[in-house]
Image: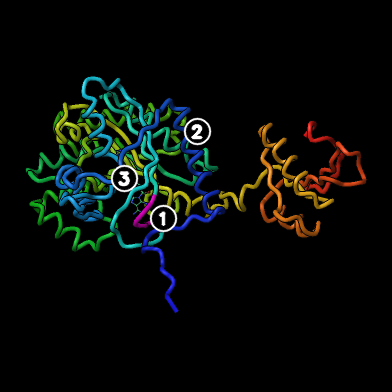
C-alpha cells in the first residue's frame, strides 16, 4: 500500500474552519489599514537571492529557503516583505508619491525550527510609510498596530507595545567605540533567550570592552526615559531621547498610550533599523512577538535607490491567532449560506429554479443534491452552517409560497421567494 504524503514541516493546511479564522484576522487587518488610509500592494513570492544577502537582515539570511532555478539563477522565497517593498519603491524612484502609505498581506517563508508561534510558512501583514522623516509616521504605525489588536477584541492590558530606539543604542555604541554594530544588535536582541555568559561572550566577540558592556547593561535596566537621561552624553543621544519623548506624547494623542511602554531592551534582530524600534507582546509574555518594526532610513539607498526615510512593521498571523485562541476571541464553526433550500416534493428542477431566483438577487443559497429525506436535508443545512431552512414544494402552503425556519430560534414563517 502506498504511504500517505505528509505536508512539509512548518506548513499548515487550511480547512474551511481554519480559513474562517484566517479571514477573521485578515479582514480586521484590512479594515484597520483602510481606516488609516493605507493602500495595498503585492510582489512576487520569490526574489533574487542577492536582495537578501548582506543588505537587509543578517538574522533572516540564515533562515532563507533558497535554490537555483533551471536557468541557474539564485532564488530565495521571500522571508519578509521589506526588501521587496524597498525594491518596488526604488523602481518608481521620483514617481513614488510621498509619503506612500502601503500595506500588504504576503505569504512568507523562513527555514526555522518549528515551535509554538513559529512556522516555516506564514502570512504577515506589513504596513509601511515611505518618504517621511517625521516621528509622527512612527507614531501612526504603532497606533495602527495597537488598533489592530483592539479590532480583534484584545484590550490594552492584553498586549504591550515595547518601544525603544536603535538610534539611542547606536550612539551609545559609538561612544563605546564599537565599529561593527549589526552583530551587537543581534546579541542584544537575543539577550533574554541566551544564558548570561553566552550573551556577554557575544558582546565581547563583537568588540565591546567590559566597561562598555556594563554601560549597555545600565541602559538596559532603565525603566523610563527619565532614567536614561543621565546615562547618555552626546548630542545625538539626547536627540534620540527627545525623539522618543515626542513619540510617547503622540501615542497619548492617538489614545494608545495605555498600550505602549518604553523598553530599552528592544533592539530588533534585523540589521536595517536606524531609529525608533518596537515589538508587540502578549502581556503575559507566554508567546513570541506578535509584531515588530521600526524606522529603516538607509535600506532603500543600500538596495540601489535614493535615500528615502521609511518606517514599518510586520505582524504575523500565527502568534496573534494563538493569543486570540487563548483569550477565546476566535470565531468557531464555518460561516455558511443564509438560506438552505429543502425540497419537500422531491422536485429538483423546482429547487434549482428557486436557488437561481434567490442567487440572482444576491442571496447566499445552498441545497442538498439528489433530494432525499427531509431529516437528511435538514442535517445538511446544519452541517453547512446555514442560518435558515426554506421548504420548497410543500402542499401546506400556496404554490408561490415557501415555509421558512430560522435554524437558531426555531421560529417558522410563511412567505414568497420574492419576499425573501
Ligand atoms: P520580524 O520581526 O522578522 O520583522 O517579523 C515580524 C513578525 O512576524 C513577528 O513579530 C512574528 O509575529 C511574525 N513572524 C516572524 N517569523 C515568524 C515565523 N517563523 N512564524 C510565524 N510568525 C513569524 C519583519 O519581518 C520586518 N520585515 C517587519 C517590518 C516591516 N519592518 C519594517 N517594515
Nearest the eye: 290 or 23: 23
* Residues at discs 3 and 2 in contact (Cβ within 8 Å): no
- Of circles 3 and 1, the one toward us is 3
Quadrant location of the C terminus?
A: top right
Q: Which residue is mark 2?
A: 31
Q: Is residue 228 above or below residue 342?
A: above
How many other residues sit within 10 Å of disc 2, few (<14), some (14-19) or many (≥20)? few
| Res 408 seen here | no
- Residue located 10% across and 56% down the image: 205
On the image, the x and y values in percent for residue 223 come to 32, 43
How many other residues sit within 10 Å of disc 1, few (<14), some (14-19) or many (≥20)? some
| Res 76 seen here | yes
On the image, the x and y values in percent for residue 334 come to 61, 51
Nearest the eye: 148 or 387: 387
On the image, the x and y values in percent for residue 221 come to 27, 48
What span is colored magenta in the figure?
118-122
Mark positioned earlier in the residue sequence (2 or 1): 2
Spatial distance from mark 2 to mark 1, Cα to Cα? 25 Å
- Of circles 3 and 2, the one toward us is 3
Mark positioned earlier in the residue sequence (3 or 1): 3
Nearest the eye: 342 or 274: 342
Is residue 120 highlighted in magenta?
Answer: yes
Dividing the picture into quadrants, the one containing residue 235 is: top left
State left or right for residue 122 relative to residue 18: left
Q: Is mark 3 within 8 Å of ligand 1?
A: no
- Residue located 45% across and 79% down the image: 1
Nearest the eye: 189 or 226: 189
Amino acid at each position: 500500500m502506498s504511504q500517505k504524503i505528509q505536508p512539509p514541516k512548518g506548513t499548515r493546511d487550511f480547512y474551511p474552519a481554519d480559513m474562517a479564522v484566517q479571514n477573521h484576522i485578515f479582514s480586521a487587518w484590512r479594515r484597520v489599514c483602510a481606516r488609516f488610509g493605507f493602500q495595498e500592494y503585492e510582489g512576487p513570492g520569490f526574489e533574487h537571492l542577492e536582495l537578501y544577502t548582506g543588505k537587509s537582515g543578517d538574522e533572516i539570511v540564515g533562515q532563507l529557503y533558497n535554490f537555483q532555478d533551471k536557468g541557474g539563477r539564485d532564488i530565495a522565497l521571500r522571508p519578509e516583505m521589506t526588501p521587496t517593498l524597498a525594491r518596488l519603491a526604488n523602481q518608481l524612484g521620483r514617481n513614488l508619491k510621498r509619503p506612500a502609505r502601503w500595506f500588504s498581506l504576503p505569504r512568507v517563508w523562513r527555514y526555522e525550527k518549528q515551535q509554538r508561534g513559529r512556522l516555516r510558512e506564514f502570512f504577515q501583514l506589513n504596513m509601511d510609510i515611505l518618504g517621511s522623516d517625521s516621528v509622527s509616521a512612527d507614531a501612526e504605525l504603532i497606533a495602527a498596530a495597537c488598533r489592530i489588536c483592539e479590532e480583534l477584541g484584545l484590550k490594552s492590558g492584553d498586549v504591550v507595545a515595547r518601544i525603544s530606539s536603535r538610534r539611542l543604542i547606536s550612539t551609545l555604541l559609538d561612544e563605546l567605540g564599537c565599529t561593527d554594530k549589526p552583530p551587537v544588535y543581534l546579541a542584544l536582541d537575543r539577550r533574554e533567550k541566551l544564558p548570561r555568559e553566552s550573551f556577554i561572550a557575544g558582546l565581547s566577540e563583537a568588540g565591546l570592552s567590559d566597561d562598555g558592556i556594563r554601560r549597555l547593561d545600565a541602559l538596559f535596566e532603565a525603566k523610563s526615559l527619565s532614567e536614561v537621561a543621565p546615562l547618555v552624553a552626546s548630542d545625538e543621544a539626547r536627540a534620540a531621547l527627545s525623539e522618543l519623548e515626542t513619540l510617547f506624547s503622540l501615542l497619548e494623542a492617538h489614545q494608545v498610550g495605555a498600550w505602549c511602554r518604553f523598553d530599552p531592551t528592544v533592539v530588533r534582530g534585523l540589521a536595517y533599523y536606524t531609529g525608533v524600534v518596537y515589538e508587540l507582546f502578549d502581556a503575559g509574555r507566554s508567546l513570541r512577538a506578535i509584531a515588530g518594526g521600526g524606522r529603516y532610513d538607509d535600506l532603500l539607498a543600500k538596495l540601489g535607490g535614493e535615500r528615502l526615510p521609511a518606517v514599518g512593521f510586520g505582524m504575523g498571523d500565527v502568534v496573534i491567532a494563538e493569543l486570540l485562541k487563548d483569550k477565546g476571541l476566535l470565531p468557531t464553526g464555518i460561516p455558511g449560506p443564509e438560506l438552505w433550500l429543502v425540497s419537500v416534493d422531491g422536485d429538483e428542477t423546482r429547487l434549482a429554479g428557486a436557488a437561481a431566483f434567490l442567487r440572482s438577487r444576491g442571496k447566499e443559497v445552498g441545497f442538498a443534491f439528489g433530494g432525499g429525506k427531509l431529516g437528511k436535508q435538514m442535517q445538511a443545512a446544519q452541517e453547512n452552517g446555514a442560518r435558515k431552512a426554506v421548504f420548497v414544494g410543500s402542499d401546506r402552503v400556496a404554490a408561490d409560497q415557501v415555509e421558512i425556519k430560522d435554524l437558531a430560534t426555531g421560529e417558522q414563517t410563511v412567505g414568497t421567494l420574492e419576499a425573501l
